[in-house]
Image (tube, grey):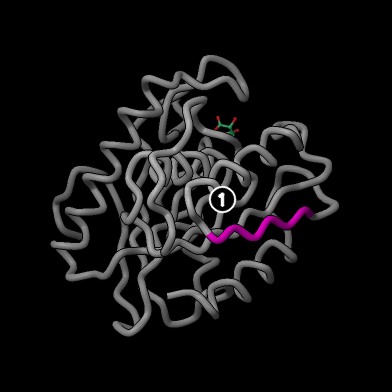
Amino acid sequence: MADLSFVHTHAPGDPARAPLLLLHGTGGNEHDLVPLVPEIAPGRGYVSPRGKVLENGMPRFFRRLSEGVFDEADVRARADELAGFVVEMREAYGLAAPVAVGFSNGANIAAALMWRHPGVFAGAVLWRAMTPLREAPAGGLEATPVLIVSGAMDPIVPAADVGNLALRLREAGAAVTHETLPVGHGLTRPDLDLARDFLATTA
Ligand code: MLT
């Protein structure tokens, strides 16, 4: 692995397809989502960083004040930092703009990046995402297809919150598909199927 600003793992893939940027949930690490790659995007390369914020020893991508209540100054700073890592990794490994694939806290930092750095991602899969920031996104997401998959029984993500996320991303120009599954916060087989179908038609 190249010595970059985030601990990460990387595997090359089909150079004709955008690589994935895998973003784990709270308490995960850079290895968590790797086993899903052959299922959702066979043949694609990936880069998977580990979140730098520790909450009781659990890695995350930004600080929160309590469950579902974010430290928004930290969200902004960490989104900017991760956008810098995307530039670094593209240069180090010779990669096109990645498609973000994030779960929970990883989906939230991916959304925050789209708020502040349109154009960094070629697309995004956001599993169990929330609205990352109260201000409106910067805009400029016209070229960005986004799949949001929520759980109707998710105890962490209120339906109104993810509805607002979809609306804000659409207002910023993104082509948003929002699916709601009859499940909770954890990932399920239908989450993988939706991601696979979406990624088959994305960058
Ligand atoms: C977050 O903090 O990003 C959300 O509450 C999701 C989580 O990590 O549990």
> Which quadrant does ligand 1 occupy?
top right
Query: What predominant SS class does the magenta segment belong to?
Result: strand
Q: Is mark 1 within 8 Å of ligand 1?
A: no
Which of the two residues, 176 or 184, is positioned nearer the viewer here?
176
Residue at the location (51% across, 51% down)? 102
Name the foreground residue: 127 vs 147.
147
- Quarter holding the N terminus? bottom left
* Horizontal side of residue 101 vs 116, given as left or right: right
Q: Residue at x 29, y 82 (%)?
A: 15
Q: Which residue: 59% across, 72% down?
A: 198
What amino acid does circle 1 point to? Arg
> Residue 50: image x %, image y %?
36, 44
Q: Which residue is mark 1?
A: 170
Residue 183 % position (x, y): 81, 50
Left or right: where 118 falls relative to 108:
left
Front in this rendered view, residue 159 or 137? 137
| Magenta-colored span | 175-180
* Image x and y of residue 111, in percent: 48, 43
Give the image quarter of residue 143.
bottom left
Indicate yes or no whether the magenta region holds residue 176: yes
When asked about the image quadrant of residue 203, the answer is: bottom left
Tell how many labels: 1
For the residue carrying disc 1, how many other residues have a C-alpha within 10 Å: few (<14), some (14-19), or many (20+)?
Answer: many
Give coordinates of residue 138: x percent, y percent.
38, 39
User: Residue visible at 35% across and 63% down?
Assistant: 98
The reply to whether the magenta stretch includes residue 151 is no
Q: Secondary structure at mark 1?
A: helix
